[in-house]
Image (cartoon, rainbow, N blue to C red):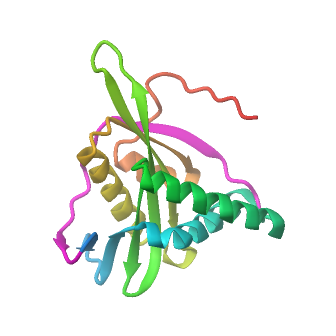
Amino acid sequence: MQMQEQIRISLFCIHLFSKHISKSGAGIFFVVPLGMKNLTLQKIQIEQIELLTKYRMEYLEEMQGELSPEYKAELEKGLNEYFSEAMQGERFFAYMALQGEKVVSFGAMVIKKIPGDANKPLYLEGDILNMYTVPEERRKGYSAVILQELIDEAGRRGISKISLHTSKDGEKLYRKFGFSEPHYPVLELCR
């Protein structure tokens, strides 16, 4: 499997996607955007971390290629630990979309505290990750629903900047929501 090219884009604040939401139970919303029926958006709870890990691993294999069984076991353990610690520390949140009983899409955000400047003593920034829709359910708008909820939740938490990496396939969606290249150049050192 080929590794897909990724692009770094950033967002400063956005509210463009309209939807109808009605609450039903703790952390569950029924979302009916653009004519979707029976779609449930659910905040992922700590008890559901193994499900999140499973789909994170599917996403990674699709983007980076097949993983060895030994590394898969190590990665699974590490992801479960990370998600558990980060959720408990309120540094991570995630949502999943269900069509009926079937899980069709995921998205998550890592929250970082950034030292302040002349404008504000402290900033919160969010990195979106785990944006993944199962292959047979793509191009139906599920990622847009997840993305809007991540953006809304970021706003409720006072997050002032959101960034993400995208594949070429996802870039069009993110740009519709106002994501663009960072104001300042981004350089990375990968080891």
Can residue 188 be seen? Answer: yes
From the viewer's perspective, tell me whether residue 49 is left or right of residue 5: left
**Count the marks: how many?**
0
Write the start and end of the magenta stretch as one range: 1-25
Whether residue 3 appears in magenta in the rendering, the answer is: yes
Residue at the spot 54% in from the left edge and 79% down from the top edge = 136
Can residue 130 be seen? Answer: no
From the viewer's perspective, tell me whether residue 137 is left or right of residue 179: right
**Viewer-proximal residue, 172 or 188?**
188
Q: Is residue 129 above or below residue 123?
A: below
Residue 38 location in percent, x, y?
A: 30, 84
**Viewer-proximal residue, 90 or 164?**
90
- Where is residue 62, by image quadrant? bottom right
Residue at the spot 36% in from the left edge and 20% down from the top edge = 116
Whether residue 89 appears in magenta in the rendering, the answer is: no
Q: Residue furthest top?
A: 118
Residue 26 location in percent, x, y?
A: 25, 72
Q: Is residue 85 above or below residue 57?
A: above
Residue at the spot 43% in from the left edge and 55% down from the top edge = 88
Residue 144 location in percent, x, y?
A: 37, 61
Residue 100 location in percent, x, y?
A: 37, 87
Residue at the spot 79% in from the left edge and 62% down from the top edge = 71
**Viewer-proximal residue, 167 or 164?**
164
- Where is residue 11, by image quadrant? top left
Q: Main secondary structure of the magenta part?
A: loop
From the viewer's perspective, tell me whether residue 76 is left or right of residue 155: right
Placement of the C terminus among the 4 image quadrants: top right
Placement of the N terminus among the 4 image quadrants: bottom right
